[in-house]
């Protein structure tokens, strides 16, 4: 199962590293053919400079990314990213060919801009909830939850909540036992909403 995580300059480090770790650790408990193939995607082949000057390279770009089963859009300083037509169109196109689309933190703004979330119940980082409500008034933006599951679309609150949502995804796509084993291996106190 291919899990693609979209990253960009000024992305929040734990927004992509947390989910990446969850799916990587979960795979340790799975047979080879059952493992998650988790990878990072960027718009172009360049070093991404995430928050805190954290430099990282993606595995794939828009040009060569394989088919994804799960597409995760991360947050960070998203205000420039939502203005990029190429990015928004790519997210829109990718979402049509994937089983699950998820966002961490302010990644919800990119999903809203791409019209993947329209009148859905969603969440984001607590600090950005007022802006998400203002910018996309048709959304039902909820507070004080770690993630929201709308079937094939999931959104999470800020930063570390992406780990909780990813563990939930593991339980949803595989089983609860694997999610619990993964959380224990990570020494992470999983909040199940």
Image (cartoon, rainbow, N blue to C red):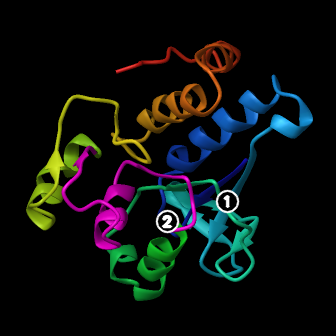
Residue 38, how many percent across, how many down? 72, 49
Q: Nearer the viewer, residue 138 or 126?
A: 138
Q: Residue at x 41, y 56 (%)?
A: 75
Query: What mark, if any, has residue 95 been given in the picture?
Result: 2
Q: Residue at x 82, y 27 (%)?
A: 30
**Is 54 situated left or right of 39 in this image?**
left
Q: Quadrant of the C terminus?
A: top left
- Residue 23: x and y in percent read 68, 37
Residue range (magenta): 95-123
* The quadrant where residue 5 appears: bottom right
Placement of 33 over or under 12, stated as above or below: above
- Which is nearer the N-term, disc 1 or disc 2? 1
Q: Which residue is mark 1?
A: 40
Q: Can you tell which quarter of the image residue 110 is in?
A: bottom left
Label 1, label 2: how far apart the Cα atoms are:
16 Å
Select label 1 or label 2 by which is in front. Answer: 2
Q: Is residue 116 magenta?
A: yes
Residue 97 position, x and y percent, is 57, 66
Mark 2, residues whose alpha carbon is within 10 Å: few (<14), some, or many (≥20)? many
């Amino acid at each position: 199962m291919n899990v693609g995580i979209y990253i960009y300059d000024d992305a929040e480090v734990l927004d992509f590293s947390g989910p990446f770790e969850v799916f990587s650790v979960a795979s340790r408990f799975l047979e080879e053919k059952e493992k998650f193939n988790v990878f990072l995607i960027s718009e172009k082949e360049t070093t991404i400079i995430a928050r805190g000057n954290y430099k990282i390279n993606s595995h794939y770009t828009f040009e060569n990314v394989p088919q994804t089963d799960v597409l995760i859009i991360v947050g960070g300083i998203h205000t420039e990213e939502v203005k990029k037509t190429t990015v928004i169109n790519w997210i829109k196109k990718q979402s049509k060919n994937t089983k699950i689309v998820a966002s961490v933190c302010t990644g919800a703004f990119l999903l809203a801009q791409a019209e993947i979330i329209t009148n859905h119940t969603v969440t984001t980082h607590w600090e950005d909830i007022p802006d998400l409500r203002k910018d996309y008034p048709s959304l039902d933006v909820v507070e004080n939850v770690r993630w929201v599951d709308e079937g094939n679309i999931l959104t999470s609150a800020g930063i570390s909540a992406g780990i909780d949502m990813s563990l939930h995804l593991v339980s949803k796509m595989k089983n609860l036992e694997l999610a619990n084993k993964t959380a224990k291996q990570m020494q992470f106190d999983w909040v199940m909403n």
